[in-house]
Image: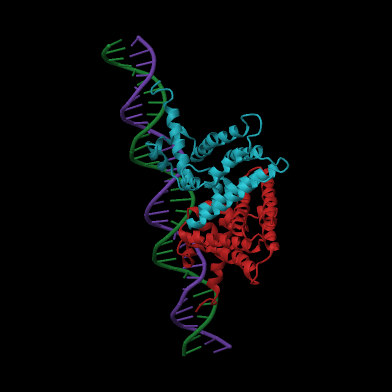
Chain colours: A cyan, B red, C green, D purple
Amino acid sequence: MPYAKDHKQKTRARIIEVARVLFNRHGFQDVTINMIMSESNLTRGGFYNHFESKEALYRSAVSSFLMGRGAQWRAEAGVDTGNPGPDMARQMIDGYLSAEHLGDLDGQCPMIALPSDIARANPQVQGAYQELLTAMVSLFEGSLDDTEHSRQKALSLAALCVGGMILARTLPNSELANEVREAALTQAQSIANAA
Amino acid sequence: MPYAKDHKQKTRARIIEVARVLFNRHGFQDVTINMIMSESNLTRGGFYNHFESKEALYRSAVSSFLMGRGAQWRAEAGVDTGNPGPDMARQMIDGYLSAEHLGDLDGQCPMIALPSDIARANPQVQGAYQELLTAMVSLFEGSLDDTEHSRQKALSLAALCVGGMILARTLPNSELANEVREAALTQAQSIANAA
DNA sequence: TGTACATCAGTGAACGCGCGTTCACTGATGTAC
DNA sequence: TGTACATCAGTGAACGCGCGTTCACTGATGTAC
């Protein structure tokens, strides 16, 4: 058994992490396998030792974000049996619609970076995407006071967070972009705080 | 002067319309020039009689939506000097977040269909996109009663409309998709109606 | 402890295909006389 | 009115390039003895 047992697994993880960042920044089609492998300090040909195809890697990359951030959201939403309390939703909103998140092309949420890619991707990728959204919605839903409309509000908050960031991201005028982000932030907090 | 004077112009307009629909449905990269020209009942080679490049056509296609729907929005927002009244915003919201609009892959708003493409496109395309957004925001802003927060609310409404539709579009589960759409619709109307 | 061996992650050249773009040519149509 | 001509929108074959994918080979490393 040449190479340490976890050698291949580590290499695989490194490729996924590199790919996640590159896909987030440039989208699925503009990232080449050569780019990914070079950035991982490997050569093109070795790619197929680790993945069946470029799309299989894409699936893994989207899932890897889900496993990280998405699981974190779910844990925070339900870990202590009771609801997470309104602070959780407020923190989530503040972080999601923050200037930092807007500037973080590498680490941003894939729901912002890749909506078009996902809408046209295969069902497995879409499934991972849906899990990410439901994790976010669950956190909101459990955290709201207004139990009667909590689901409707939670879904709207998700739409507002994602929509605000997407619009801000597409605007070439960064002043307007920030205005959109802050307007959405204000509105989202107002919805979360309403009785 | 062979061919009628407006012959070439009509052909050009036909190509743009075909391209707008195809780009809306499949995104910039998945549409080939051959597809566009075939669908326009022409052959590949003639393309460059009309456009400098594929991207130039893309610009024209985004603009063509802006010239149509965007101009309509702007006209409705400001045509009778005074503000358009709250009904205008309500109508806009109802139409934008309608089940029909969700199902209309060909005619949908490019802000829903093409956000990733646009975010990575050149400044001219992004400019056309920004004009579309500002037209929408102007309509909302002029139509709201709450003058103190009207701009903040108008920007949030745009984020909610676009975000709600994008999320719904990416979800493979159409039941959840409709739930998101309706939640956003309810929330948007509530914001528009608040004092 | 030291050496030969087997394994397999990684290499890099090559293939094949599709697509954007170019270009020499065609032929339908309006105009000149 | 009819005919020859000039124009130019449209044709279709070909080019060139890049990228996903394949494959025969290499060489570093853990294991057997």
User: Which is nearer the eye, A29 or A95?
Assistant: A95
Total labels drawn: 0
In percent of width and height, residue B75 lies at: 62, 69
The answer to whether residue B28 shows anywhere in this view is no
Q: For the point 56% across and 65% down, which residue is it? A: B64
Specify the quadrant of the image occupied by residue B108: bottom right
The answer to whether residue B139 shows anywhere in this view is yes
Q: Is residue B194 left or right of residue A74?
A: right
In percent of width and height, residue A189 lies at: 61, 46
Q: For the point 37% across and 37% down, which residue is it? A: A43
Q: Is residue B183 left or right of residue C19?
A: right
In percent of width and height, residue A123 lies at: 60, 41
In percent of width and height, residue D16 lies at: 37, 54
User: Which is nearer the eye, B32 or B96?
Assistant: B96
B101 lies above or below A65 = below
A46 lies above or below B104 = above
Q: Quadrant of the C terminus of chain B?
A: bottom right
User: Which is nearer the eye, B156 or D19?
Assistant: B156
| Farthest front residue in view | B148
User: Which is nearer the eye, B138 or B64?
Assistant: B138
Specify the quadrant of the image occupied by residue C9: top left
B52 lies above or below B188 = below
| Farthest right residue in view | A148
